[in-house]
Amino acid sequence: MTTKKTSLSIWGWGSLGVVLFLITFGPFAIFYFAFYILCFVGGGFVVTLLFGKSNSEKYLEQCEHSFLPCTSVGIPKCIEEMKREARPIKIDRRLTGANIIDEPLQQVIQFSLRDYVQYWYYTLSDDESFLLEIRQALQYALVQFSARSKETDWQPYFTTKLVDDFGTHLRVFRKAQQRIAEKGDQMKDQAEELVDTFFEVEVEMEKEVCRDLVCTSPKDEEGFLRDLCEVLLYILLPPGDFQNKIMRYFVREILSRGILLPLINQLSDPDYINQYVIWMIRDSNCNYEAFMNIIKLSDNIGELEAVKDKASEELQYLRSLDTAGDDINTIKNQINSLLYVIKVCDSRIQRLQSGKEIDTVKLAANFGKLCTVPLDHILVDNVALQFFMDYMQQTGGQAHLFFWMTVEGYRVTAQQQLEVLQSRQRDGKHQTNQTKGLLRAAAVGVYEQYLSEKASPRVNIDDNLVAKLAETLNHEDPTPEIFDDIQRKVYELMLRDERFYPSFKQNVLYVRMLAELDMLKDPSFRGSDDGEGESFNGSPTSSINLSLDDLSNVPSDETVQLHAYISDTVYADYDPYAVAGVCNDHGKTYALYAITVHRRNANSEETWKTYRRYSDFHDFHMRITEQFENLANILKLPGKKTFNNMDREFLEKRKKDLNAYLQLLLNPEMMKASPALAHYVYDFLENKAYSKGKGDFARKVPPLIQKTYSDPDHCRVAATIDDSVDDNIPLRVMLLLMDEVFDLKERNQWLRRNIKNLLQQLIRATYGDTINRKIVDHVDWMTSPEQVADAVKRFRDAFWPNGILAETVPRRDKAIRMRTRVAGKTKLLEIMPDELKHIIGAETTRKGILRVFEMFQHTQLNKRMVYVFLERFLETLFPQNKFHELFNKLHSRSKQMQRYKQRLHSTQAPSLQKR
């Protein structure tokens, strides 16, 4: 109660005071009161501030001399320097030591800074020092780059690495095309499928790297170029400048996005490449026949529609002309030509859209209408002879053909030797015995190889003729005509025996031969209803090519099944019947392998063991690869070993490799592809002593043309180049390119040997023995200051015409690009010399040229080739910086690479589990 009374009294007295105050001073008294209080507080704050500031200054002045350390001299000096005017920085304009190069390079640097930095930098600052620092950094990098390039030997890069990389790129593309063809035409987007397959083959061949992300993803491509430019700046710039992140990032972006990326995009553009091809061969006029061949061979509907639309446009223009007299005949001919072009395009488009192709039955029904090539013409034509040779090897008659060819060579050689002998006798020089001895040795060699009882395979001919020849060789001097009688008999045998030439004319190889000789017509273009059609004088259309590829020989009835394997390894000091025993014979130690053979036919089954040395395998391999040269790229015999070749672990590994060799050799598909191979295999696996067909000398001395036993499908081109031509730069380059462009390694090795000899003669006749020196001089000329300056000027004029940054060229219309493709292909086919067609065949030449052209029609694949050239360039320029490992790391995120490693791991996992 007391507390409540107290609170009421306080409120009461307070209310009374407020009422009395308002009555006394009026209602505005409260505002006056608040104003007085505010003035009192403000005045007190001002007085306190002024008094405190003066006292604080005095106190700090006293403390400066008593407590704090002295101020650094550098700070006021730095402030003083900043207040002064900036002095101009002197720039040394020397870059490479050659004025003709430095001048355009300085202009490129100036234009780059102006168009990529200055246009936005001046909106932030007027200070020139940052721009000058960037320019100095660029110039320093160019100076270091120039110094490195002068110390580099560029001859291996231009003559070896560049060619190998291009050949490998073409090989990958060819293998990708083959895989697409094996899959069929079920895919929706064949171009995209081709790109995926290409990089799939690349990773299988390279095994360590795949460039699919860089070539297909713009984001990853920019990241790759940034990383690459940063590495180059690390190598070329001083450490201090490289540590300056702001300047480093600016220079990196200028190089990667301002220079390299636009340049790579331009070089990878198929339309740009097509225009460049047309410009390069601008002096060649387009041939109507070559143009029509391209139309009939085209499998791109876009190309056909573009040509058809342009022909229709020209047709409308010609029909609108009002002409009379002689001009009307010319215009009528032009109209008829355009109508025929439109008709061919329509026919080809309909066939491609419907998917209808000429089937093998129709093609076989037309065999009787094909041209007949006489045997004597086949034997003297390189292109025809290679197909007949392949057929004779399949039927086991190669000995007859090789004998005929060997006798032809012997006759020419003997005539030349005798002419030389006669000329020397007229000059008083006597070397009769030596020349006759050489001729006798050559004639006896031919007899021993093909006609003697020891010959394998032996030419089956009249024994009386062979005996007469042997008598002549023993008692008379050999003459060029000594083999003529037997050669005529062999020719008649090949001509009339149903196994040889008559059956060859019914074989698919004969049809392929006609296609290579330009003697196979396309039945769909033999004529038209209006009588204005013309036959296709050149090659079959792609539909016929597909049908030819689908044809195969009729398989023979295989009633005998043969299986063989090397048993488990058992070691013995001397046991000729050990499974893989180490034996000693007359002081020579060797390994002996026991082979268990199972032979089964419809009525019986038998098993036996036979014993073979490694030298037996080697001799057998040499024999079959000589008789069936296509096996050299398929069968891989384990290599020899000079030291520790009796080691237990080595013998176990060799046994596994020989077992794999046997299983591949006995594969039914292998035996079916070469029926005559069975005879050699049975002879090798029979339970008897193996009679070597080659002597020790023949087995140790390599043949004239080395056969490569590396799988060409899964290795780079440089891994399979012949050592015998590696020292001859032009021969190596030409042979390598011809191998990949025209797929000669898959063809008859006899043809390839002839091409090699022809190229050697051509190079020797054209340049003599100084060709390598001339090529080295040419490389020096290409890297001379004049040529480098010219390249820099072309780059400057392309990106900054008349000193102004070139605008982005709009993408040309699709129809124009398609017509450019047709024009480029026509130009390429037109410049192909007829001599090349006569050497390797018209169809092979067309396919090779069109394959190369098709390879350049994919932007992603072109980028891959550009990046490979760039990588090899940097590896050559900076050999000590391990760029190869760096590129492997930069490409390590490749999806194809990850899939390949997964497949590799999945295939190795079962074998590891078994162990």
Image (spheres, helix red, strand yellow):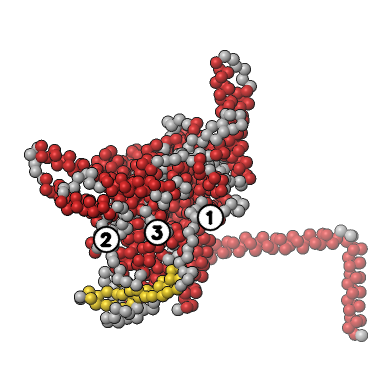
Image quarter in which the N terminus is found: bottom right
Quarter-of-image position of residue 614: bottom left
Is residue 112 visible to us here?
Answer: no
Hey, what amino acid is under mark 3?
Answer: Ala
Q: Residue 660 at x, y = what percent?
A: 41, 69
Label 3 crowd (10 A; few <14 / some 14-19 / many >=20): some
* Residue pointed to by mark 1: 182
State how far apart marks 3 and 1 are (Cα).
Answer: 27 Å
Residue 820's place in the image compared with 707, above or below, is above
- Residue at the image position 17 percent from the left and 39 percent from the top: 419
* Residue pointed to by mark 3: 676
- Using the image, tell me which numbered label, if any, was put on residue 454: 2
Q: Residue 591 at x, y = what percent?
A: 30, 75
- Using the image, tell me which numbered label, if any, was put on residue 214: none
Label 2 crowd (10 A; few <14 / some 14-19 / many >=20): few
Q: Residue 511 at x, y = what percent?
A: 47, 45
- Residue at the image position 47 percent from the left and 63 percent from the top: 558
Query: Looking at this rendering, what residue extends furthest in the front direction?
Result: 464
Say which label, 1 or 2, has the lower sequence index: 1
Say which label, 3 or 1, has the lower sequence index: 1
Instruction: Classify residue 318 as left or right of residue 239.
Output: right
Query: Looking at this rendering, what residue extends furthest in the bottom direction?
Result: 1
- Circle 2 SS class: loop
Hey, what amino acid is under mark 1?
Answer: Glu
Hey, what amino acid is under mark 2?
Answer: Lys
Residue 345's place in the image compared with 222, above or below, is above
Q: Residue 170 at x, y = what percent?
A: 44, 50
Is residue 33 visible to us here?
Answer: yes
Depth-wise, is mark 3 or mark 1 nearer the camera?
3
